[in-house]
Image: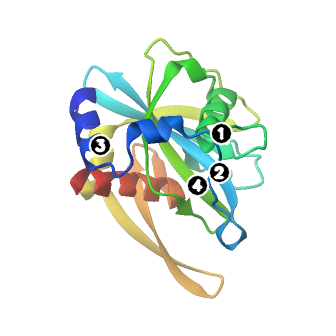
Amino acid sequence: MNKHIFLNRFLFHNRQNISDLLAYKTPFNLNQQGLKKAAVLLPLIKRQNGLNLIFTERALHLRHHPGQISFPGGRYELTDHSLQQTALRETEEEIGILQSQVSLFGSLPNLPTGSGFMISPFLGFIDNEHTILIDKQEVRSVFEVPLAYLLDKNNYYKQHFFANKKHHFTYCIAYQNRLIWGATAQIIKNLQEHLAN
């Protein structure tokens, strides 16, 4: 899927006007059940065979979710003007992609997590002239996955588990020697469903 087709499909199904999204300057109330606000960026980049999504592998020494696959992003800070800025700031801090090299164009539904966060996912196209500069305190590696692979329902499976005396499940996507699961896989699943509506 190329950039033009993806953007048309995404915006056609988007319930939120893009001008409303980009004009938004104050953080909206996500304090449901005491959840902390966070934001991630789904960084899309144009490659010869179509669009790819950029992922990070979290550093192994981190206290929370070490080694897991995620999107660049993190906790909202009071100095952030909006959750969009949170996603852009964290992306620049974690993997060196400058805020000026990201063109935001949309968002996905907020996602509560079991670790106490309400994640706001934003989508943006990345300038091909960017340079990756990894902050080793937060990120172990950066890699790309073709968007077409991620949107293929045949590449998903459900993993059931038991935690906190309850049954849960997570979507999982295996790609090469990596496993995308948890909130990251759920965000991709939400994107897939958004495009399929």
Looking at the image, how many numbered discs can be counted on the residues? 4
Whether pointer 1 and pointer 3 mark residues with C-beta atoms closer than 8 Å, the reply is no
Q: What amino acid does circle 3 point to? A: Phe
Position of residue 5 relative to residue 34, above or below, is above
Mark number for residue 86? Answer: 1
Which residue is under mark 2?
38
Question: How busy is the neighbourhood of tag 4: few (under 14 within 10 Å), some, or many (20 plus)?
Answer: many
For the C terminus, the quadrant is bottom left
Query: Residue 141: percent from the left, percent from the top?
Result: 59, 33
Disc 1 on helix, strand or loop? helix
Please report the residue visible at 60 percent of the width from the left and 65 percent of the height from the top: 113
Label 1 vs label 3: CA separation? 22 Å
Q: What amino acid does circle 4 point to? A: Ile
Label 2 vs label 3: CA separation? 23 Å
Left/right of residue 166 with respect to residue 115 in the rendered view = left
Disc 3 on helix, strand or loop? helix
Q: What amino acid does circle 1 point to? A: Thr
Which residue is under mark 4?
119
Query: Residue 69: percent from the left, percent from the top?
Result: 55, 47
